[in-house]
Amino acid sequence: MTFSIAQDKDKQIKQILTEVYDALKEKGYNPVNQIVGYILSEDPTYITTHRGARAMMTRLDRDDLLQAMVSYFILH
């Protein structure tokens, strides 16, 4: 049995992004624009506190987030 830390990290990132996306959408924001704004500026006010989205998003390392997104885009 092999264990991949990178795979687990990617799953965690996907789960957090999905939950943040849903919370932003529920509050009436454009989730993609808000997440991109957060990634570019690291300003947490781009992410709503609704459903704990801001707390979840700020736990992610921005470099890990960008790496996972680029890897996903290239591989899929």
Image (cartoon, helix red, strand yellow):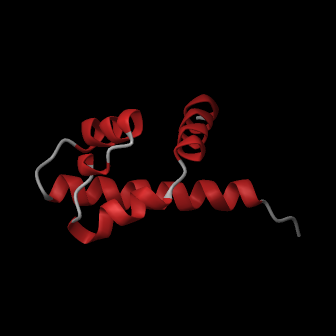
Residue at 66 percent across and 62 percent down: it is: 8
Q: Nearer the viewer, residue 12 or 55?
A: 55
Is residue 54 left or right of 6 when viewed as pictured? left
Give the position of the C terminus as an image quadrant: top right
Q: Is residue 33 above or below residue 53?
A: above
Could you tell me residue 63's position as x and y percent? Answer: 58, 41
Q: Nearer the viewer, residue 1 or 57?
A: 57
Is residue 75 left or right of 48 when viewed as pictured? right
Could you tell me residue 24's position as x and y percent? Answer: 22, 54
Could you tell me residue 46's position as x and y percent? Answer: 25, 46
Say which quarter of the image contains residue 55: bottom left
Is residue 46 left or right of 68 when viewed as pictured? left
Report the label total: 0
Residue that extends furthest to the right in the rendered view of this protein = 1
Could you tell me residue 20's position as x and y percent? Answer: 33, 57
Q: Nearer the viewer, residue 65 or 61?
A: 61
Residue at 32 percent across and 60 percent down: it is: 54
Residue that extends furthest to the left in the rendered view of this protein = 28
Residue that extends furthest to the top in the rendered view of this protein = 74
Residue at 34 percent across and 41 percent down: it is: 38
Residue at 61 percent across and 38 percent down: it is: 67
Q: Is residue 38 above or below residue 40?
A: below
Is residue 14 left or right of 51 when viewed as pictured? right
Give the position of the N terminus as an image quadrant: bottom right
